Image (cartoon, rainbow, N blue to C red):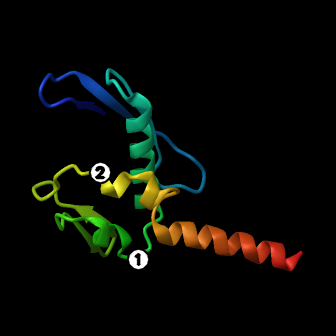
């Protein structure tokens, strides 16, 4: 799948599904034809981590100033009509490693392993 820049119709993101053991959905992401490709690649990575690790903690919903993010049965959903593209939901300062719950669970599991040894 190619995602095009709306004004120029130039491809900027390529998404290629692939199979990985233990994961139902996996994609390879390639960013191209944009000035800050590394930043966009990182933001896409955050969004994918956040979606895959969603524990319905409401962190991203509370960060969204335009009320574009809502937590549903399958995780979070972004309402494109309300989204103002502020990028708060993909800002490293707030969501490094995905959502806050995923970060907490990773920290707790790491602490548990240290204590067991």
56 relative to 109 in the view: left or right: left
Q: Is residue 59 left or right of residue 22?
A: left
Q: Nearer the viewer, mark 1 or mark 2?
A: 2
Give the quadrant of residue 41.
top left
Residue 96 vertical placement versus 57 (above, below):
above
Which quadrant would the C terminus be assigned to in this image? bottom right
Does label 1 or label 2 sit earlier along the sequence? 1
Residue 16 can be seen, yes or no: no
Q: Residue furthest front?
A: 93
Mark 2 element type: loop
Q: Is residue 105 visible?
A: yes
- Residue 89 image position (x, y, % from top left): 33, 57
Q: Residue shown at 40%/60% (left/top)?
A: 51
> In this orientation, which residue lies closer to the viewer: 85 or 28?
85
Place of residue 59 in the rendered image (x, y in percent of width and height, measured from the top left): 37, 72
Which type of secondary structure does the marked residue at label 1 adopt? loop
In the image: residue 96, left or right of residue 34: right
Residue beneath the point at 52% across and 67% down? 102
Q: How many marks?
A: 2
Q: Relative to 98, is 58 on the left or the right? A: left
| Depth check, front residue: 81 or 59 | 59
Image coordinates for residue 46, horizontal then vertical, percent: 44, 51
Quadrant for the N terminus in the image: top left
Label 1 Cα crowd, 10 Å radius (few <14 / some 14-19 / many 20+): some
User: How busy is the neighbourhood of tag 2: few (under 14 within 10 Å), some, or many (20 plus)?
Assistant: few
Label 1, label 2: how many angstroms apart (C-alpha)?
19 Å
Q: Residue 77 is drawn in which quadrant?
A: bottom left
Q: Which residue is mark 1?
A: 57
Q: Residue furthest right?
A: 117
Residue 44: x and y, percent?
Answer: 39, 44
Name above or below for residue 103 compared with residue 27. below
Q: Which residue is mark 2?
A: 87
């Amino acid at each position: 799948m190619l995602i095009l820049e709306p004004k120029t119709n130039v491809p900027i993101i390529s998404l290629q599904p692939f199979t990985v053991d233990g994961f139902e959905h996996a994609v390879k992401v390639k960013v191209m034809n944009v000035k800050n490709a590394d930043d966009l690649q990182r933001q896409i990575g955050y969004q994918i981590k956040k979606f895959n690790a969603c524990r319905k903690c409401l962190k991203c919903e509370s960060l969204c100033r335009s009320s574009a993010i809502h937590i549903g049965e399958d995780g979070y959903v972004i309402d494109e009509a309300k989204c103002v593209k502020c990028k708060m939901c993909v800002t490293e300062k707030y969501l490094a490693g995905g959502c806050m719950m995923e970060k907490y669970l990773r920290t707790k599991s790491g602490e548990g392993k240290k204590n067991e040894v």
